[in-house]
Image (cartoon, coloured by chain):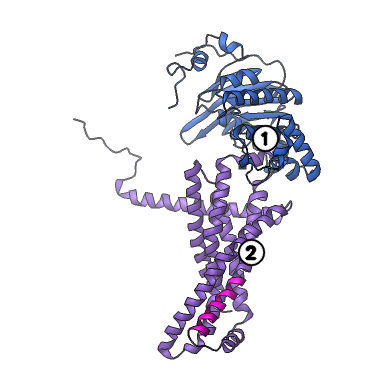
Chain colours: A blue, B purple
Amino acid sequence: MNGPAINLSPITAPAKLAWKGVRKRFGATSVLADLDLSVAAGRSLVIIGGSGQGKSVTLKVALGLMEPDAGQIALDGQNVSGLSASARRKLFSRFGVLFQGAALFDSVTVWENVAFRLLNADGVGRKAARARAIDALERVRLDAKVADLFPGELSGGMQKRVGLARAVVATPEILFFDEPTTGLDPITAAAINALIVEQVRRLGCTAVSITHDLASARTIGDEIALLHEGRIVWRGAPADLDATSDPRVRQFVDGRPDGPLTAQL
Amino acid sequence: MTAPTAAPSGAPPAGLAPARLLGRSVLGAVGKVGAVAMFAGRGVAAAATPPWFLGRLLRQLAAIGYFSLPVVGLTAVFTGAALALNIFTGGGRFNAEQVMPQIVALGITRELGPVLAALMLAGRVSAAIAAELGAMRATEQIDAMQTLSTDPFRYLVAPRLLAGVLVLPLLTAVADLLGVAGGWLVATRVLGFNPTVYVRNTVSFLQAWDVGSGLIKAAVFGFIVTVMGCYHGYNAKGGARGVGRATTHAVVSASVLVFAADYLLTSLFAHT
């Protein structure tokens, strides 16, 4: 059965980051099947999709935490798949990542978490690194008093803020957000979304997010792409989510269990 | 009724199933050995070349060494004491009770000191390393570290390997002293040995190599214990259950490898 035509908005600006024919399998299971996707410089792309459709793998492949079986990841037009470990570390200096559970290091304090890259990769002195970390914490509305606490002493929302501060402290070119509002109450989630928008605009950077939270997607995305069975099956502006008649988008937005998107139970 | 179907022409005969299973197990084991060897090689390379994270090394020296002192010390004292009693009883069967101090000293320095210290570290440290790194893997902290341009092998693995290699010989030296002291305590308080003669016999009998060979063994064991903890924790999969499995595998594999390495090193040192 032929599905509706895929709405892949034409990209006029050159792509900052692109997935080109990316394939990834785990054993017999195909997770990404010729994924073609790109995001222009300065734009915020949100990838939505159900559980098990390949969102996390899409992000990990772009970050280089996972190598694709086939295809390329292009950054500013250059293929960055299969880089050596040292080249990959240099590339990471252009990225900032907010992980799903914040992924803060338990054994070091909040400010040392925020300044981790500065201290351990960039060779910034402790005094200067601490000052920059506290500045970043204040930008995400966290008081300097939390700087000397350990991550285990913070609430989930505060941990997400610290994770965001860590992602932006070194002024990255591309920010990645992995399910930024998962596990948060609606008010805290809205606050995190607002902070993400604020930081992306302040830095003028490109952003790629994955989420299944539509409220979050509408707030932080300039464009939204629906990933299903390892491919992008729809792409458009946040306003188009409600306007489109695409049955896959309609099913996802309405949260109906029956429809063209098979629920992964 | 379903008609019997012929076996596919490419399928091996059913009688070969055990051989196939054995082959698969052997291949799996060889693959695991290769994976551990590559992991250890990466760890050694990270430990041997800059940048070093000295703060992390100091923290590991304290965690692995200083905080293991009580358990290693107590184990050594009790083992030395029990060894003295056993050798005294056994030696009595052929009137050799008087060589008990020398045998205790030899047994502790060459064998029991390093092996028992390593086993205590396998239980205490290998498990803790596997659990900590496994939890970091499960909560994406290791991925996060990579995206922060920091090599987890340099930050997490190398300090633990270095600390293991540096600290276990020191713990073994303490275990040697306390093990001999345990034997001395039983010999002088229970078995009626003269304290001064016991010490004189022990010191005059022991050669530097008896202690030195034990310390070399300990350095190798320290590497084994920490590398197994790091390997299983770093490669943990499957959330909390995976962390538990990693911890068990780390302790079991470290203990077995300590015994295997002990035999190999003892064979190597046998004529020295």
Could you tell me which secondary element the residue under label 2 belongs to?
A: helix
Q: Is residue B183 magenta?
A: yes
Left or right placement of residue B31 versus residue B209 in this view: left
Q: x and y percent of residue B159 in the render?
A: 66, 55
Q: x and y percent of residue A96 in the render?
A: 69, 33
Local crowd at mark 2 within 10 Å, few (<14), some, or many (≥20)? many
Could you tell me which secondary element the residue under label 1 belongs to?
A: helix
Q: Chain of mark 2?
A: B
Image quarter where the N terminus of chain B lies is top left
Residue A244, located in which quarter of the rendered image?
top right
- Give the residue type that dot 1 points to: Val
Residue A257, located in which quarter of the rendered image?
top left
Q: x and y percent of residue B117 in the render?
A: 55, 67
Both on one chain, marks 2 and 1? no
| Magenta region | B174-190
Q: x and y percent of residue A66 in the render?
A: 59, 37
- Give the residue type that dot 2 points to: Val
Q: Main secondary structure of the magenta part?
A: helix
Determine which residue is flagged by label 2. Answer: B167
Nearest the eye: B190 or A47: B190
